[in-house]
Image: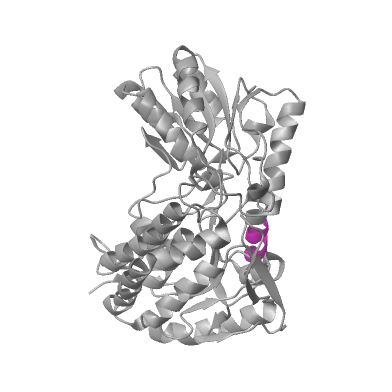
Amino acid sequence: MKMLINGEWCDAASGKVFEVRNPATGDLIEEVPFGNEDDVRAAVEAAGEAFADWSTKDPRVRSKILLFAATEVRRRNTELGTLLTTEQGKPIREAVDEINGFANILEYYHALSAREQGEYLKIRGYGHAAVQRRPLGICGAIIPWNMPAIIMGWKIGAALTAGNTMVLKPARTAPLTCIRLAEILEEAGLPPGVLNIVTGPGETVGREIARNPGIRKVSFTGEVGTGRQVAMDAAPTMKHLTLELGGSDPMIVADDADIGMAVEGVIRGRFYNCGQVCTAVKRLYLFDSIADEFIRHLKSRVEEIVVGNGLDRGVSMGPLNNRAGFMRVVTQVDTAREQDEGTIITGGRTPEGEAYKRGFFFLPTLVTDVPYDSILFSEEVFGPVLPIATVSGLDEAIDLANNSRYGLGASVWTRSADVIARATESLEAGIVWVNQHLRIPPEVPFGGMKSSGIGRENGSRALEEYTEEKTVLIRL
């Protein structure tokens, strides 16, 4: 596969490539250009040349291109889902859902494109005021490997609808689906230079996107340390920033909750995509009175999860995406075990058998009686491991849930209106679910508090993030 710069599919300026391998088998899938700063600068130049025409097009014309692309993506969802599973590892059902989610985002912004941006005011003593919203210009996007299609959709959907052009860097371990989606957008009529894809390492390509003075905004999704570096690199040129930096989402189950529903919420909320979701359930707090029953049902359901190659029939959880992530999960579980931080009641190791030796597989894991200061609670565990603690009631659960540097998502499971009101008011998170977890429709703003980031993606709010205001005061 090639990079996309100014409508041309090309190799890197360096002539170098890097390998993309299947995380389930270790097999080579594709070689991709190893881009560098020069490639980013060429993409910025192309995006700058394309901006004048793209930003002045009728918004309905821009949005039709997104709609045409969405229709084609849906038509090819199995093909694209297979590619996503092959490079990322998730089961094919989850991959096809993600591809359809990308199409859903483009369709949403198509529908939103006719909405008037800005506002008009009549102010006594001053006259008339018009608050105009204009596209920022060239924007940069840095995409992670865990949900590449969805997160690409979040960033390009709002940015392109608002009239911006973009330079996008996919993740090194999962760039192929992003490239294919860009091809479909080009086939749908996206003009040259509006969307440019530069593949390569974060140390060069990512940093140049953050530093380049021609780029007005950077939207980054990834871990906290890298997000801080992006912010520091962007600061000298006063870029607009959206940083979504991960989370350690608490799930609180009250004593009046529907246990069956909540158990299924854990299964999807923790083990979807092998637990590699920033808003996954990563800390489970159970009211004392229901803890034993809940854990018994949950253990039974977890042991029904079928681990394997995401392309194989019947598999419900694939491998971790890369060696670094795999080793971090292994280290976190081993550390908790060595320090006697809880009891592993299922999982806690790699599965046995020849089929698992070449991939980054780890069994779905439950750890009970976890002390509140355990590494499993204090660090983000980006894999299929769930620490569980019991609480005396809602006040203790909320205190523990908020005792984290993260504040991305949280959920509460209850039938009580009072519990819902208290929890949704008090939980320090950018999104709070009630009797559900992980679901994020494109209509709602998404982002975090505290170290989980700044800015919002999704919804009409995202269009504001990709525009700037100009106030015009008129006295007649």
Q: Return the x and y of residue 431 as percentages of the image width and height.
A: 43, 42
What colour scheme was applied to this rendering of the protein? one colour
Q: Is residue 77 left or right of residue 292?
A: left
Question: Vertical placement of 118 versus 381: above or below?
Answer: below
Q: Return the x and y of residue 154 as percentages of the image width and height.
A: 43, 61
47 falls in the magenta region: no
Looking at this view, is 241 or 150 the one in front?
150
Q: Residue at x 50, y 44 (%)?
A: 279
Question: Vertical placement of 272 versus 371: above or below?
Answer: below
Predominant SS of the magenta segment: helix
* Quadrant placement of the N terminus: bottom right
Q: Which residues are magenta?
A: 229-236
Is any atom of residue 375 visible in this view?
Answer: yes
Question: Vertical placement of 347 versus 135: above or below?
Answer: above
Looking at this view, is 443 or 239 the one in front?
443
Q: Residue at x 31, y 73 (%)?
A: 63
Q: Residue at x 63, y 59 (%)?
A: 231
Q: Quadrant of residue 424?
A: top left
Is any atom of residue 129 visible in this view?
Answer: no
Q: Residue at x 66, y 43 (%)?
A: 353
Looking at this view, is 227 or 320 the one in front?
320
Looking at this view, is 127 or 156 the one in front?
156
Q: Is residue 184 left or right of residue 246?
A: left
Q: Return the x and y of residue 11 as percentages of the image width and height.
A: 63, 84
Q: Return the x and y of residue 45 as percentages of the image width and height.
A: 56, 85
Looking at this view, name the residue that lies furthest to the front. 354
Q: Is residue 463 left or right of residue 383?
A: left
* Quadrant placement of the C terminus: bottom left
Count of labels in the image: 0
